[in-house]
Image (spheres, rainbow, N blue to C red):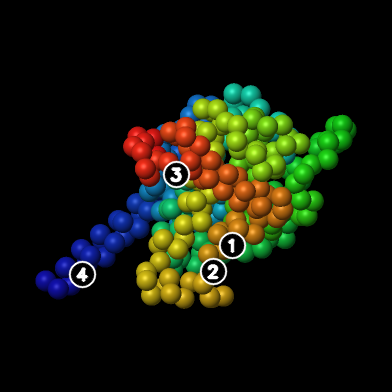
């Protein structure tokens, strides 16, 4: 009887493993990358990612590489990469995919394979050459973005692409390229830019949320060199002017919050405000 029970356990385990292998693909995510309409969260399969994380991390690396390159291309300095209806939808879908994907990658802090996938330096940057104009094209105007080489790892490129996406003229900004890093860059907004800023900020915050999946004991040592929150460090140390511009923009939004119209920041703490 004991042998028979053991055989049933092994058979059940094999069936589970076979099911995971069969589902270790990224079909719904690949379709999302090429979607021409807005994605919904339910169209992206969490099981696909978990199965790939367990037994096919090569597919995850390929998916993440394609997603990072899309975000980098669409967030390029002039705003041309996100101009037009199709390009805007593509960038918005990319941001939504990051917000859905990263919790699935970060939910197991003990998964050394995911840390390796995100933070191991490659021989060349995953986004190398994307910002370069094609051969024979007219030289682009000087950009305010740093001239240093992009990060050599997927995690660093992802975080920097998300910060870049917060300062794209015509997408998250109404201002022109020359004014996009000014202290008042986020003062002007519209329904479209507010939607884009929310999507970009959500993706950035989710990407920096690895600490939320740690136990109190793990979190106590998370600030050490052994287990830093690499995404958070990459975000707060984004090269100038990106990091400083993001800090100023967030402070400007916080301290200019005045829905009542009395000119008093945080007047909602004194008067009712249904939108706070």
* Real-space Cα separation, disc 2 to disc 3, in angstroms: 34 Å
Q: Earlier in the sequence, mark 3 or mark 1?
A: 1
The quarter holding residue 234 reads: bottom right
Mark 2 near mark 1, Cβ–Cβ under 8 Å?
yes
User: Would residue 174 appear left or right of 16 to someone viewing this image?
Assistant: right
Q: Nearer the viewer, mark 2 or mark 4?
A: 2
What numbered label is drawn on residue 233? 1
Visible residue check, residue 130: yes
Numbered disc 4: secondary structure: helix
* Real-space Cα separation, disc 2 to disc 4, in angstroms: 42 Å
Numbered disc 3: secondary structure: loop
**Residue 44 on image: x %, y %:** 42, 40
The quarter holding residue 235 reads: bottom right
Q: Earlier in the sequence, mark 3 or mark 4?
A: 4
Which residue sits at x=66%, y=52%? 244
Which residue sits at x=63%, y=24%? 84
Visible residue check, residue 171: no
Numbered disc 1: secondary structure: helix
């Amino acid at each position: 009887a004991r042998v028979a029970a053991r055989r049933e356990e092994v058979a059940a385990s094999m069936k589970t493993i076979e099911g995971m292998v069969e589902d270790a693909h990224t079909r719904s995510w690949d379709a999302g990358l090429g979607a021409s309409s807005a994605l919904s969260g339910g169209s992206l399969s969490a099981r696909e990612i978990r199965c790939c994380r367990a037994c096919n991390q090569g597919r995850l690396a390929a998916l993440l590489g394609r997603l990072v390159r899309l975000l980098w291309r669409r967030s390029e300095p002039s705003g041309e990469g996100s101009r037009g209806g199709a390009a805007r939808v593509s960038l918005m879908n990319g941001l939504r995919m990051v917000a859905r994907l990263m919790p699935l990658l970060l939910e197991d802090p003990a998964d050394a394979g995911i840390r390796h996938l995100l933070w191991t330096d490659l021989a060349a940057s995953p986004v190398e050459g994307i910002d370069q104009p094609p051969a024979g094209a007219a030289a682009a105007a000087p950009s305010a973005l740093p001239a240093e080489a992009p990060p050599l790892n997927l995690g660093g490129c992802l975080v920097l692409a998300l910060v870049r996406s917060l300062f794209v003229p015509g997408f998250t900004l109404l201002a022109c390229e020359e004014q996009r890093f000014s202290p008042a860059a986020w003062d002007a907004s519209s329904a479209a830019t507010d939607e884009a800023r929310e999507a970009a900020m959500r993706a950035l915050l989710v990407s920096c949320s690895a600490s939320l999946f740690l136990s109190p004991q793990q979190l106590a040592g998370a600030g050490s060199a052994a287990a830093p929150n690499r995404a958070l460090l990459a975000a707060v140390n984004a090269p100038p002017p990106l990091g400083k511009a993001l800090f100023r923009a967030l402070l400007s939004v916080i301290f200019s919050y005045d829905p009542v119209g009395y000119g008093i920041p945080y007047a909602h703490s004194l008067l009712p405000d249904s939108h706070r």
